[in-house]
Image (tube, grey):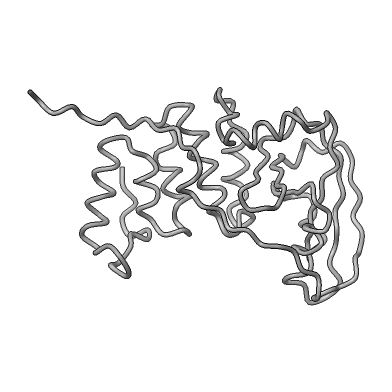
């Protein structure tokens, strides 16, 4: 169960190549899933997760999925895989969020207005990533646009939302494309001066459920 050649760190920075490969092997043998996935560079962490998804407990699956999702730089590039993972019927799906996020999600109304900023109209409804913050969506639409971008406004039932993340300061909502009740797509002015506060998530501060059980030393 390996991903040979898929981005094991090459010794740049803190670990040497040999040490990281040893860490990956040990993590895999000990069912320490986070360690295994994080022994790969960011672009390949989804691949690592896909390799071990059927070996994880339900709690570990959802907990680690949240980490990998937040670490992903552009989930739209691997949309087919992400949709399948988020569609999972495994129990304990609430563990994809930490306690503060679960409490915030519980406090939301039963029907939500969500936003998505895009710069290509045909991709407006294909994504999983939305926000409760209209200004944040406009910023996402603007940041890479070369012509007037689009703002998508949609309605969704809270019961159809797969996750609500706060770590990146984006009031993030994850919802499957086929669960939208209604939507509108409109052009918005290109505004490169639009600024929002950017927060970077810190995996070390986020709860992780693990299947790892340390081996007891023999007496």
Answer with left or right where residue 99 lies relative to residue 133: left
Which residue is at the front of the view, 213 or 86?
Answer: 213
**In the displayed structure, would residue 2 be above or below residue 43?**
above
Q: Position of residue 204 (x, y in %)?
A: 45, 48
**In the displayed structure, would residue 147 be above or below residue 111?**
below
Which quadrant of the structure image shows residue 196? Answer: bottom right
Answer with left or right where residue 172 lies relative to residue 119: left
Q: Position of residue 98 (x, y in %)?
A: 57, 36
Residue at the spot 73% in from the left edge and 70% down from the top edge: 143
Image quadrant in which the N terminus is located: top left
Which residue is at the front of the view, 87 or 213?
Answer: 213
**In the displayed structure, would residue 43 be above or below residue 93?**
below
Which quadrant of the structure image shows residue 192? Answer: bottom right
Q: Position of residue 170 (x, y in %)?
A: 70, 52
Residue at the spot 37% in from the left edge and 58% down from the top edge: 6
Q: Position of residue 30 (x, y in %)?
A: 27, 35
């Amino acid at each position: 169960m390996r991903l040979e050649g898929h981005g094991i760190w090459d010794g740049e920075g803190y670990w040497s190549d040999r040490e990281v490969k040893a860490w990956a092997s040990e993590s895999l043998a000990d069912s320490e899933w986070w360690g295994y996935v994080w022994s790969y560079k960011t672009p390949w962490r989804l691949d690592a997760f896909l390799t071990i998804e059927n070996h994880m407990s339900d709690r570990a699956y959802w907990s680690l999925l949240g980490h990998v999702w937040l670490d992903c730089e552009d989930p739209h590039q691997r949309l087919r895989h992400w949709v399948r993972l988020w569609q999972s019927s495994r129990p304990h799906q609430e563990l994809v969020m930490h306690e503060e996020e679960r409490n915030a999600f519980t406090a939301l109304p039963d029907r939500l207005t969500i936003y998505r900023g895009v710069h290509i109209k045909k991709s407006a409804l294909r994504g999983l990533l939305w926000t409760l913050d209209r200004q944040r969506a406009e910023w996402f639409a603007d940041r890479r646009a070369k012509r007037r971008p689009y703002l998508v406004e949609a309605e969704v039932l809270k019961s159809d939302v797969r996750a609500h993340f706060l770590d990146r300061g984006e009031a993030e909502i994850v919802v499957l494309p086929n669960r939208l009740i209604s939507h509108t797509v409109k052009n918005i002015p290109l505004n490169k001066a639009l600024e929002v506060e950017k927060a970077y998530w810190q995996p070390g501060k986020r709860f992780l459920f693990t299947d790892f059980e340390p081996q007891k030393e023999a007496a």
